[in-house]
Image: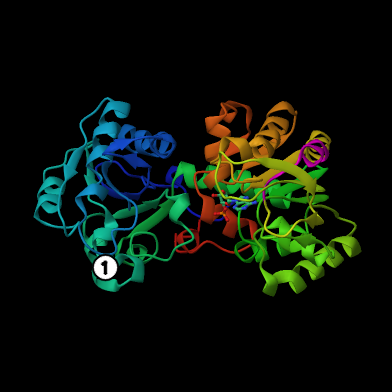
Amino acid sequence: MMLNKKSIDDLVVKGKKVLVRCDFNVPLQDGVITDENRIVAALPTIEKLIQEGAKVILCSHMGKPKGEPKPELSLAPVAKRLCEKLGKEVVFAKDDNVVGENAKKAVAQMKDGDIVLLENTRYRKEETKNEESFSKELGSLAEIFVNDAFGSSHRAHCSTVGVTKFVKESAVGYLMEKEINFLGNAVNNPERPFVAILGGSKVSDKINVINNLLEKVDTLIIGGGMAYTFAVAKGGKVGKSLLEEDKVEYAKQMMKKAEEKGVKFLIPVDTVITQEFKNDTPFKTVSTMNIPDDWEGLDIGEESRKIFAEAIQGAKTVVWNGPMGVFEFPNFAKGTQAVAEAMAQIDATTIIGGGDSAAAVNQLGYGEKMTHISTGGGASLEFLEGKELPGVAAVDDK
Ligand code: AMP
C-alpha cells in the first residue's frame, strides 16, 4: 500500500529540532520494563534522525495517569533503556508539566545528534482531550514533528494530532510506515487464500472488524469468548459462557453475509468447559452448541484446534487478533497455542494484530516466525475496520 504521507526520508533535518511521538507505553513491573519490543521498534527512526544530524526530542505516553503526575508511570526507565540501546546519552527532561523548565533548558542546550526525552504526555490533562494549549507547548519545542507511534495513532490527542498545527512540517516515521504497509497490504492486496482469525472476549469490540473483514477474506475464524454469541445465533446453548445477548441478531446477520459472499465462517465445534473461572479446576470438552447450565467455555476444544490449524495451513495470508481462550490460565491456553503454532509453521504472510495475541506469540517463542507483529492492538483493530487513523491523517501529505 502506498501511503500518501510525508516520510522522514522526505525531510531535511540537519540542525533542526525534531519532535518525535513514539509509543513507549511498555509494560512495567516494579519500575522494570518487562517487554522492550516497543522501544526496539522505535530505534530505526531515532537512529536515522541522529545520523542526519537532527536534534531529536522524544515524547510518549505511558499507561493512564489520568492527567496528573504519577511517579510509577514516569518515562524515566524508558530513558535509561533507550540510552543502553542507542549507546548514547538520552537526557530525560523530568517535568511534571512535560514541557517545563527542564525540557526547555535541555532543548536549548541541544547539539546536532543529541536526544532529549520528555516526561509522560498523559501527565497533562489536556493531552487526551486534544486541547490546543498543550499542543502549542509541544509544538513550540521543535520545527518538525514526526509521528512514529502507531500504537497511539487511533487516538486524536495533543501529541498525535493537535501538535501538527504548531510545527512547520510533519511526517510519519519508519515504524508507522512499516505497520501501515504490512497491515494495509495484507488486508487490501492479500495473496489468497486469506484467513483472518478473531478472538478475545467481546463481539461488541470487533463488530466493525468482522463486518469489514467479511468483504476481504476467504475464511473467517472466530474463537475466544466472542464465539459463544455466534453459537447462540446458530441455536446453541452456552451455559454461563460469555454471551452478548444484544449481539445475537448481529451475529446472525454476519453469518448470513458470509454465506452470501462465499466466505467460510468457522466457529469452534467443541469447547473446554469448567464450573469455576480459574486454572486449577476440573475441565472437560463438550460440543460448543450444548454447554450445560452452570458450566462455561474457557478454550476451544481439540477438534476445533485441528480444524482451525487446517484452515491456517492452506492459507497464503493470515491475520490474527485476539486469543482463542483464557490463555492467561495454562490449562486453557491450548487453543491460542495451536493457532500460534499453525501460523509459525506455514509459508505465508502472517500478521499478528498486537495486544494479547502478540504477547502470546512472543511468550511461546514464535515471534521470529511471523512476518509482522504489530506494536498496536487497538490501532491495528481500527485499521482492520477500514478506519482512517487520526494520527496518520493529521500528518502532511507528500
Ligand atoms: P480482548 O481484550 O477482547 O481482546 O480479550 C482478551 C481477553 O479475552 C483475554 O484476557 C482472555 O482471557 C479473554 N477470553 C478469551 N476467551 C475467553 C473465554 N472463553 N471466556 C472468558 N474470557 C475469555
The residue carrying pointer 1 sits among few (fewer than 14), some (14 to 19) or many (20 or more) residues within 10 Å by Cα, namely some
Placement of 68 over or under 303, stated as above or below: below
Q: Is residue 326 left or right of residue 223?
A: left
Location of residue 246 (image quadrant): bottom right
Q: Position of residue 258 (x, y in %)?
A: 84, 61
Placement of 197 over or under 89, stated as above or below: below
Res. 1 in view:
no
Residue linked to disc 1: 125
Residue drawn at x 73%, y 32% as measured from the top left = 342
Residue drawn at x 28%, y 27% as measured from the top left = 84
Question: For residue 183: magenta?
Answer: no
User: Which residue type carries mark 1?
Assistant: Lys
Q: Position of residue 44 (x, y in %)?
A: 42, 34
Question: For residue 299: magenta?
Answer: yes
Location of residue 315 (image quadrant): top right
Is 338 in front, or is 290? 290
Q: Which residues are magenta?
A: 297-307
